Amino acid sequence: MGLKHKIIFGLLVAVLPLKLQAQTTTKPVHGIAMHGAPKYGPDFKHFDYVNPTAPKGGRIRLSSIGTFDTFNPYTIKGIPASGIQGFVYESLMASSEDEAFSQYSKLAESVEMPKDRSWVAFTLRKEARWHDGQPVTVEDVIFSLNVLKTKGQPFYRFYYRGVAKAEKAGKRRVKFTFSNSENRELPLIVGQLPILPKHVWDGRDFSKTTLEPPIGSGPYKVKSFDAGRSITFSRVRNYWGATIPVEVGQHNFDEIRFDYYRDSTVALEAFKSGEYDFRQENSSKIWATGYASPAFKKGFYKKQNIRHQNPTGMQGFIFNTRKGFFKSPVLRKALAYAFDFEWTNKNLFYGQYFRTTSFFSNSELASSGKPSIEELKILTPFKNNLPPEVFTQSYAPPATNGSGHIRKNLRQAKKLLRQAGWTVKNKLLVNNQTGNPLKFEILLISPAFERVALPFIRNLKRLGIIASVRTVETAQYRKRLDNFDFDMIVSSFGQSLSPGNEQMSFWGSAAAGRKGGRNYIGIKDPVIDKLIELVIAAPNREALITRTRALDRVLLWNHYIIPQWHIQSFRIAFWDKFGKPAKSPKYGLGFDAWWVDANKAKALDSKLTSNKK
């Protein structure tokens, strides 16, 4: 090699590391988005849907159903008290309610990640403090990840399993390295990590229940409680984060109290009597008829529908396919013909609901019509392992005319049952091979759903099927779900505008046998696993939509659920003492931005006093 070539080679060797360094250099930023750039820039002062000058003060009373026996909401043991996660503990980043999936600095002052998202690093705010005055440290963050992965609920272990390690990378900087660079959602998932105080939990058994008031870093702390009956939070007067952009205009109440009621019927009567101030209604019948009281007629409390664009997910009768008789998709399809949504909506729900036809209803992520060319490119490689309808039809659950006469549907159900290997003998549907009748239980947590389940059971009886309803209290229901000890339940799978890792916990094979997991159905399908991986690895919004629609079609045509209904607005009732911002967020209720209006509260007190005379 000549001198000239040696010089050039030496320069290349010297320059190459600098070039690689430039390629991997990252810039700390204030926020990140799942796809594209976040809506709010680095100099934003507050979210658009808050009132930055909202007054602080006042007291609000809310309700919960059942009971509680722990202040640790992160383990499988016990029933956690309401409000602990949202008010006491915080995460590194905070999500906005008017974007699909963006996060902004909270406990962290900045975030950085490379283009391939193979790692993410957060620099903590130097002013972030625990309620006891101790600073929030990198050690706290690392402890939180490790304890949740080893002793937390299965959800957390599953959610953060893609995090290979967390390490201290500076006095206030913590770096998370991922085992799978295809999971583009992981930086945002880590941003949601609840941060716990290591110095408080050292030497304690994290897995046990506890009623020792927790020390967090959030805007509220536990003021008082009556075990299993009530809990009161007070606003932290010297809250370290009161002026950061994601907190401005939010958490305005001085005091928040949750009272516990035996069931929703008792809770409703308590609301109408003024025992608590705000209620979100889930029952259409109650919404239509349950609020007609003297206090409502006099305007002491109000009802309001607030339209939203939030995905409503899927609610329905959920089959536990671990049960042998529910393993057949043809049998599951047949049973859907016995549910008469149109009659139910007309006679029980006052026509307020829409039939759900997607696991991602009320969003652009929902599949509709026949598959697009882009969807077919995703689905075709799995064609031999998918129901043929995935490729040729638009999914729609069985429908009726709402009259209650569903002979046509039941005839179709009988054809499918025969196809699945079942025959009616002596008015009972029995299996052709075993001779055993089809008999199962619908497990419920609320008596309100009995009026939905019982007509369904009557229709099943006409098919020779023995079905029953069992309604149990909260603790027993939770235990049976955790152990997958049920035949059928009524439940829902909520969705966001940016589906990702939670899909693995809903439908992934690895979650099917995990105690306390959310794969209630018991799905173990390698095709679905692969489709979930594609959703998680989507490089942009367009690809995410296409891949989610493909997953949606496969879930629908496997008939894992008998779809029920959804509503496209929040139904709220509240005593007339509140102020709220003029603008509501597209994808949430924005209740944290409400405040007590002193003038309204004073006027309401005056009216109530006069009413008693």
Image (tube, grey):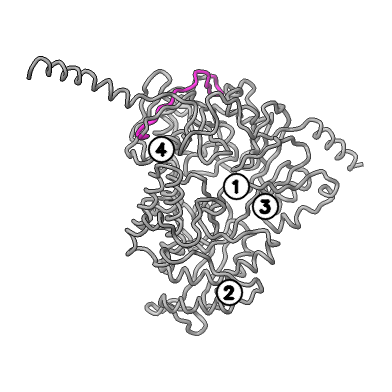
Pointer 2 and pointer 4: residues touching (CB < 8 Å)? no
The kind of secondary structure element at disc 3 is helix
Please state the total of marks drawn on the protein image.
4
Q: Which residue is mark 4?
A: 186
Q: Which residue is mark 1?
A: 309
Which of the two labelled residues, at mark 2 and mark 3, occupies the earlier sequence position?
3
State the CA–CA distance, disc 2 to disc 1: 35 Å
Left or right? Give the position of 128 relative to 526: right
- Front-most of residues 266 and 429: 429
Q: Can residue 477 be seen in this snapshot?
A: no
- Front-most of residues 39 and 125: 39
Residue ranking furthest to the right:
613
Q: Position of residue 552 (x, y in %)?
A: 46, 56
Q: Which residue is mark 2?
A: 459
State the CA–CA distance, disc 3 to disc 1: 27 Å
Which of the two labelled residues, at mark 2 and mark 4, occupies the earlier sequence position?
4
